[in-house]
Amino acid sequence: MSQAKLAANPAAIATWQAFRDQFAKANLQERAAMLKNRADLSRRGIITTIESAGQGHIGGDLSVIDVMTTLFYGVLNINPANPTDNNRDRFILSKGHCSAALYVTLASAGFFSESELPTFMQPYSALNGHPNRNKVPGVETNTGPLGHGLPVAVGTAIAARLQGRADRTFVIMGDGEMQEGSNWEALMSASHFGLSNLTAIVDRNRLQQGARTEDTNGLDPLDEKLESFGLEVRMIDGHDFEALLKALEPSTTGKPVAIIANTLKGKGISFIEDRVEWHHKVPSTDQVRLALEELS
Amino acid sequence: MSAPTPNSYNIAGEDLPVFDNRVAFAEKLIELARKDSRIVAVVNDSVGSSNLGAFREEFPDRLINVGIAEQNMVGVGAGLANAGMIPFVCAAGPFLSGRATEQVKADVAYSQLPVILCAMSPGMAYGELGPTHHSVEDLSWMRALPGLDIIVPADEQQIRDAVEAAVANPRPMYIRVGRHKVPNTTPAGAKFERGKFVTVREGSDVSIIATGSMVSRALSAAATLAEQGVSARVLNATFIAPLDQQAIIDASTGTRAIVTVEEANVSGGLGAAVASLVATSPEAGRVPMAIIGTNDWSPTLSTDGLYEHFGLTAANIVAKAKEVLSRA
């Protein structure tokens, strides 16, 4: 454990690259099956990582992992061996509390060693409860407070255009996070500047920390709101990998893209799914065993 | 009607012309932007108040106006910096430091993304517009953020130096760009060094540590004190962070008392930083201190009227210097 920036893991990068090479040759159905398999491996990693830490945000990790897996294994133009290459696609996890999902994904792709995962939230670990770009390769900006990722993503998208680069920016927000006013400031400017290279994904699991979003500060009709702000809106099942791959394709209208990914908080584990108390509950030893059985 | 702004300031019997630092700021920024395509400006509908009209004319694509949306403005700056640009994020001080504090904390200082935050018309430059438009809390708020340089240029030369330093070595920075006119006080050839004060007058009885607009007031006070037989050292606290600890220790051992002066609230700004070091450093002398700054919501007054109201004047610096020396 150290506070220095973590180092890449060449063996994992090779495995990730082999997956990407095979993915490139596969048809849509095969691609979806490959991603499903990979996402369930990450689900196992999330559960064991949170078990060892005794802390974490398991519900949101499990709702977002299919979107994140699709991005890292099927979409993002990135190089884990050179994570600051300026020609990379940017991925920003605005819902930074789902850091376990991000760390498991980054480690699987070789940004750093999977042997670091058991240090999650341990004293002086690089793997803080919320991601830190100065310690963890692949993290673009430090998130945690909600409503920060999308404004930064607008900045990276503007920079790509100013620099004549073709790369894209992807940002994932939680749905509860859409209650933050800063997101709507950013949506206005994304639309005003015509940032077709920006894709904003809402992990629409309909639960926030304390209750259902619609019982707290209702977001619906979220699609109409986003459309009225000038975005090209794509509403999909956020656990359907074929739909995710299609939705993550570039803008067709010259507008920035908003994907409403309808998801289940805790997706994949029957006793965690869609239950508000599992926002940041930690599974017991027995529950971990049951969860891993459900995934096998 | 606002009281007319004087077009000169008197130091030691000499009427010195005064300048709006936003002019030198924009000239230097344009000069550097011609040579360096990484430089962009990000504003919140503040093209005019940030004096960036000429910048926009010459570099229309590199002037990013996000409208009245300061949280987004600072986040956009962080995103631009992520991609290797050098964003000068320009907005009136109160809205930059106040409305977007969490963005400055998380997106800039904690993320260590090299965004140059330019607090235009800081302090009480907006006079009668009142406390909502004054930025006197910023030094306290920004000081609490590790990894953020805080620069308060005192005159035209220093604002040029600050802009050059930001481009030469981009890092998270908060720079006050003064609007209320001040005379040039930086000695010819004085170095602009990160984390260093500038000695603008030598002295051996009392040290006056002043920042930004108050450097000229401190020099005027020192001249008056000299006539009364008191030798005052005047230090220009160009950097509030990193703090010039050695200059403060030297002031506490080489003179018998310290007066600090800032166009900012006394709760946590320059004076608090100096006092903290004087009280806790094993190397510092425990000299008596006075801290001059604002301490309440401002009444309806012009900037100069507010300087009088809060004692941000040469006369009050003289009085405080004599008072602290009486306790030494």
Image: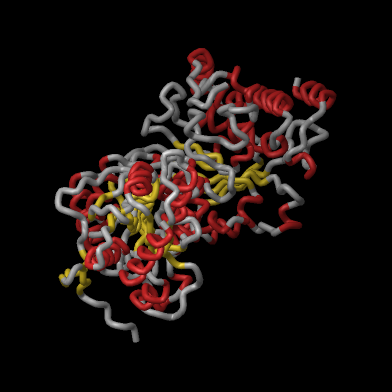
Q: Position of residue B104 (x, y in %)?
A: 47, 50
Q: Residue at x 46, y 44 (%)?
A: B109
Q: Nearer the viewer, residue A39 or B261?
A: B261
Q: Quadrant of the C terminus of chain B?
A: bottom left
Q: Which quadrant of the view contains residue B86?
A: top left
Q: Residue at x 46, y 63 (%)?
A: B265
Q: Nearer the viewer, residue A2 or B46?
A: A2
Q: Position of residue B35 (x, y in %)?
A: 18, 45
The number of discs equals 0
> Can see residue B43?
no
Q: Which quadrant of the view contains residue B55?
A: bottom left
In the displayed structure, does residue A252 sit left or right of residue B23? right
Say if A230 sits above or below A112 in the image. below
In the displayed structure, does residue A58 sit left or right of residue A32? right
Q: Position of residue B294 (x, y in %)?
A: 45, 67
Q: Residue at x 56, y 56 (%)?
A: A226
> Can see residue B325?
yes
Q: Nearer the viewer, residue B213 or A235?
A: B213
Q: Quadrant of the N terminus of chain B?
A: bottom left
Q: Position of residue B229 (x, y in %)?
A: 25, 63
Say if A292 sits above or below B52 in the image. above
Q: Residue at x 82, y 24 (%)?
A: A285
Q: Nearer the viewer, residue A86 or A31?
A: A86
